[in-house]
Image (cartoon, rainbow, N blue to C red):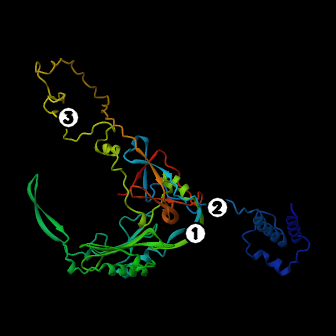
Amino acid sequence: MNDHTDDLSDRLRRSAGSDAPALSPELVAAAPGRRAPRLINHGRTARVASASLAAVAAVAVGSLVVANPFAPRAPLFVAAAGAPGGAESAALSDDARIGLWIDYDYVAGPGLSTDTGRGSVYQLQRVGSAESVLADLADRFGVDGEAGETSYFDPAWPSYVVGPEDGSAPSIQVTWSGTGNWWYNNPAAYPEPVCELVAYETENGVEEFEECTQPEIPAAESLAPSESEAADLAAELFSSLGLEVDADDVRVMADPWLTMATVNLEVDGIATAIDYSVAWTPLGDIAWAYGHSIEVVERGTFDTVSAVDAVERLEDWRWFGAGGPDYQGGMNILAAESGVARDAAAGFGAPDSPVSSPDATATDEPGGTDGGTDGGSTEPNPGEPTEPGEPGTEPVEPTDPVEPVDPTEPIVEPTIEPAPLPEPETVTVTVDDAEATLLLMWDADGNAWLVPGYAMQHPDGFWNTIVSLIEGVIELPAPIEGEVVPFLED
């Protein structure tokens, strides 16, 4: 024990000894009526006040001495199990394994950095309540009615609505979980459909059906905002709802039927996967809009792995997160140039076997339908009887009489064994570039988080988005037993 600790122990002993200040009779008499501090252990024999204070001080000082600043801290959150966002996955048993995808083997290229770093983690917390959000939105969009539970309300997925759910009039819905996402719908914003009767041949003869289409309004007659006006209006709308957005950050898409403006939540100058959108029809009215009821709360800054080390995580779906608009789209589950994938998709046959179309002959060879005169051959149909003595056939031998089936014995239906699926084609991909970004992840309680990560572009054009936090900052779900099949967006 060092001198500092000895001196501290001596001072604590003296504080509990004869040098303790005397207690007044009034204080002692009033003690039974006072509320005891929470740190007192009522199961022990009562001590004088000075001894109790010394014990509390000893606990406090002991905590300071014993605490290890390098001890591992509890994870910020437990990541949701199941299919990950971005590059989604689904688990299959060995018997149900699908081999219609490319098995990519990722390796770090010389262009990737080995430097580690640090990054902030943010939680997207809901703000207000479902009722307050609905009341505010109903006022902004002019929707009448009282907030109530939707017809599909569930405590695990609480959803509320103002207005009718059948689309007969404007309505607003909000789901009070996750990011508190809301949706405004205005069926009256669309032009009156043009309907006509169309005759079709049916099994009952010719019948007429009404078909309706939305008319195309000439651009000169459209009342929808221009692209620059739509960007300004969207920025004004979402800014009034708490989203800090500039018109220059709004993306606008327009066609003769709809003008849509979309913006993504930006954090630290990075556009995230959380988006807000509003759309106008040629009548100039808002047809629909959606957004979220959140505030961004920073939960700390943490160490991150290097881009080289992050490449290893491309083999583990649990490290995937959803990237922002710059890193979405362009994914495909099949390799279009892969012979294995193409043959498997066409006929689920072995890779080296011919694949036949439904109208093809048994051999797909010329002359396959004329009895084999050009090298092809056709086998007799076992379902069609052949007459004895017919050229090219053998006489039919009489068969033994069929034994009657015992009705008490169960009849076992024959089963058809599925054709074996081909193995995935392995392709080695060298990753030479990684961009630092923020990725959207969900925890086990349905809450949304933004965490640091890397975006790595695949040579085929799609992006892999991988969390870069060191292990232990978040708790990953248990790995799924069996194989994992990437389910990627088109």
What residue is shown with label 3?
365
Foreground disc of the pair 2, 3: 3
Q: Nearer the viewer, residue 296 or 186?
A: 296
Of the residues under marks 3 and 1, which one precedes in the sequence? 1
Where's the C terminus, which quadrant? bottom left
Q: Is mark 2 on a helix, strand or loop?
A: loop
Disc 1 marks a residue whose amino acid type is Arg
Badge number at residue 73: 2
Foreground disc of the pair 3, 1: 3
Where's the N terminus, which quadrant? bottom right
Distance between the alpha carbons at the discs numbered 2 and 1: 13 Å
Q: Where is residue 310 in the image (x, y as percent from the top left)?
A: 53, 56
Viewer can see residue 89: yes
Q: Is residue 375 left or right of residue 272?
A: left
Disc 2 marks a residue whose amino acid type is Arg
Disc 3 marks a residue whose amino acid type is Glu
At x 73%, y 72%, the residue is 37
Q: Which residue sits furthest left?
A: 205
Distance between the alpha carbons at the discs numbered 3 and 1: 68 Å
Neighbor class of circle 1 (other Cα within 10 Å; few <14, some 14-19, many 20+) is few
Q: Which of 450 and 55 is in front in this view?
A: 450
What residue is shown with label 1?
299
At x 33%, y 35%, the residue is 417
Q: What element carries label 3?
A: loop
Neighbor class of circle 2 (other Cα within 10 Å; few <14, some 14-19, many 20+) is few
Neighbor class of circle 3 (other Cα within 10 Å; few <14, some 14-19, many 20+) is some
